[in-house]
Amino acid sequence: MANFFNNKARAAAVAATNGASSAKGAALKESQNLQPWVEKYRPKSLNDVTAQDHTITVLQRTLQASNLPHMLFYGPPGTGKTSTILALAKELYGPEMFRTRVLELNASDERGISIVREKVKDFARMQLSNPPPLYKDRYPCPPYKIIILDEADSMTQDAQSALRRTMETYSKITRFCLICNYVTRIIDPLASRCSKFRFKMLDQGNAKMRLEDIAQNENIKLQDGAVDKLIKCSEGDLRKAITFLQSAARLVGAVKTSRSISNVNSKKRGHENDEDEDAMEVDGIDESMVTIKSIEEIAGVIPNNVIDGLLHAMQPRSKGAVYEAVAKQVTDLVADGWSATQVVTQLYQKIVYDDAISNRQKNKIVMQFSDVDKRLVDGADEHLTILDLALQISGVLAET
Amino acid sequence: MALLVDKYRPRSLEALTYHEDLSERLKSLAQSGDFPHLLVYGPSGAGKKTRIVATLRELYGPGVEKIKIDSRVFQTTSNRKLEFNIVASVYHLEITPSDVGNFDRVVIQDLLKEVAQTQQVDQSARQRFKVVVINEADHLTRDAQAALRRTMEKYSPNMRLILLANSTANIIAPIRSRTLLVRVAAPTESDICTVLKKVGAQEGWAEAEGLNRRIAKDSARNLRRALLMFEAVHAQNEKVTDKTLVPPPDWEALVAQIADEIMAEHTPARLLQVRAKLYDLLSHCIPPTTVLKTLTFKLIPKIDDALKADVIKWSAFYEHRIRMGSVSDFRISTFSTDEVF
Ligand SMILES: Nc1ncnc2c1ncn2[C@@H]1O[C@H](COP(=O)(O)OP(=O)(O)O)[C@@H](O)[C@H]1O
Ligand SMILES: Nc1ncnc2c1ncn2[C@@H]1O[C@H](COP(=O)(O)OP(=O)(O)O)[C@@H](O)[C@H]1O
Ligand SMILES: [Mg+2]
Ligand SMILES: [Mg+2]
């Protein structure tokens, strides 16, 4: 096989390997309904966008006037920026005109501004196609196109100034929507041309409702507290929360199907596996339920008892005993594959909220943490770094 | 003659020992028809690669084991030509982008775009998608990761990614949030003993349980390391007993010697000797971090309890310096100097 992508050669190779057995190859599995939930549950209209009331009200007003300004959406990840502009564009142009009127670009796309400019130019120059008869009764179809530049804050300053000229050149027939996390990274000449819309971190209540709706729609059973755990693990990023939920559901769902298959098989073999059914339900948690534990595992969260074990080892005792205990805990943490950043985050949480530690000690400890954060970002060895942190904290705890 | 690590590498999910629940999950995922992108992480020698190869087999059947190495040429924006090796079966391909250092973005971008755009040629393939396994994903540059992110965002029914990494620390958040995180903990010492026992039996070697336990401990829960030591011990001894010495790798023996010398005599002359030995190690391509860590952990049992935290502190300090690109031989010597005074 000289070339992996040479289809003919590969097809021949396959025919050779599979030969007679090719008949048994199952039909390709349909992946239409296996779409990521983040896409499946992306708000379809402006009304579906939750928790951004002010922004949505203003946008709805502009929608009625059909005269859009250039726009700048900013705010943390997973708060609905991309969804909002897509929904807005859909309401403006409807499904049939969407393709010819809306261009979505990643501003940080590798080849940089020259490609962006090229694409914008080509797109802007394309003649405005006319909407089909009666279409305009349903969708306003204003006479301009929309260009969405996602991740605009990762563009260089130069690229941004170049973009400014592009915006000017085509301003009659296009509207730009820039999307970014940090508005301060957009140069002023660009930002000042846009109406700015801030997207807030979703509040607990709204995020919770959204996740519960999805779970219900997907027939997912959730353990009490699982949604709160999802929100906590995803730090207000709804995309992350939805992805975690889908992963967790996949695992239980997957296990469920394969278990039931193997159950059927064992029944066929005439086994006396009856008590299996009863064994499924333990502590009110059945196997098909998304549990707090499974969410933690997916999010890479370290179980509390593991962090407590480390904290316990750090408590003041004789120096030799402390070293032995801490070194063992850290060695295990590292061998178990927990990420150092996660260890640091969780340890920090525990210590900051520990009333038994004086403020003076906490101040010292916080310094250690910020030092360690930087080292880890620089790619320092995780084992040595955590061991050092734990021993230093332990030293501070021993001071009286 | 194949090494034990290759000869007895389990090939199917059923054959995997330890972490049974994880094997079960992978199996379910492979059978569900809803296979997500994966980020598989855990320490070296934990069995990540083995588990993934077994998962691929579960996905596609034994055809996935027929692999070829394909050499491809990529062109950078500055028109430099890069040669790059791809390990591929008809169903999957495996790449190690860190092989091309800072040019990894080009490779990722071009290659993945091609895969995402081509359909499975094997009409009878069990999966519609092809899998791309990316080794050492934690060594990918930010640029390459950004390119990867966009490929993942533009959901392609033709492709799934499996990223392998020792740690998630250097993986950017958008990638982490688009993959299913799979943690592979290192096997416990007793897991390792079970593997050694099985492998030994298959080789027809007499078992020395105490010896196996020592190997498991010395391996620091790294199964690859344990198997290599196990093989070395049996190669060097006609008959093994619980007391047979397990020879450490040469370089490790040298580090142990250095630790002894540092402890025995604190003179400038001795320091120069130590320095020469360290230099020797580094010139034999043992990574400076490995040398520093090994030296640290060899020194620890020899020093006063009151000093242990400080030794770790300086060791961590200098290791960070090494990462920041200072001359490593010099750093380690400074470390050993600080150690003494
Ligand atoms: N305000 C919101 N209302 C409803 N769903 C949201 C909201 N914010 C995020 N989501 C959900 O999270 C996913 C990611 O949102 P997206 O608009 O891509 O976020 P952003 O562009 O701000 O990073 C969406 O598919 C949607 O399911
Ligand atoms: N589940 C297992 N049971 C028995 N041996 C294993 C298992 N997993 C890995 N090994 C052995 O350990 C060696 C190292 O595993 P590998 O998958 O290469 O680790 P990693 O990718 O985590 O560095 C392999 O060569 C194989 O022989
Ligand atoms: Mg977005
Ligand atoms: Mg490996």
Image (tube, rainbow, N blue to C red):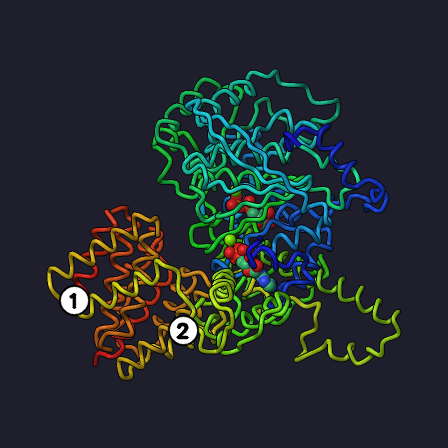
The x and y percentages for residue A300 are 51, 62
The x and y percentages for residue A173 are 53, 20
Residue at 72% across, 37% down: B120
Residue at 25% across, 50% down: B328
Q: Is residue B209 something that shows in the picture? A: yes
Whether residue A309 is situated above or below residue B173 in the rendered picture: below
Task: Indicate the quadrant where residue B3 lies.
Answer: bottom right
Quarter in which the C terminus of chain A is drawn: bottom left
Quarter in which the N terminus of chain A is drawn: top right
Going by the picture, which residue comes out furthest to the bottom?
A317
Q: Is mark 1 within 8 Å of ligand 2?
A: no
Q: Which mark is residue B340?
A: 1
Going by the picture, which residue comes out furthest to the left?
B268
Q: Residues within 10 Å of mark 2 (few under 14, many from 20)?
A: many
Q: Is there one chain holding both mark 1 and mark 2?
A: no
Between A358 and A282, the one lying in front of the other is: A282
Which chain letter goes with mark 1?
Answer: B
Between B326 and A183, the one lying in front of the other is: B326
Q: Which residue is mark 2?
A: A329
Residue at 79% across, 81% down: A275
Label 1 residue SS: helix
Whether residue B240 is situated above or below residue A83 in the rendered picture: below
**Which amino acid, by three-letter code, is at mark 2?**
Gln
Between A311 and B107, the one lying in front of the other is: B107
Q: CA distance from mark 1 to mark 2?
A: 27 Å
Task: Indicate the quadrant where residue A225 lies.
Answer: bottom right
Between B58 and A230, the one lying in front of the other is: B58
Going by the picture, which residue comes out furthest to the front?
B238
The x and y percentages for residue A141 are 64, 26
Number of marks in picture: 2
Please name which of the two marks, 1 or 2, marks the residue nearer to the observer: 1
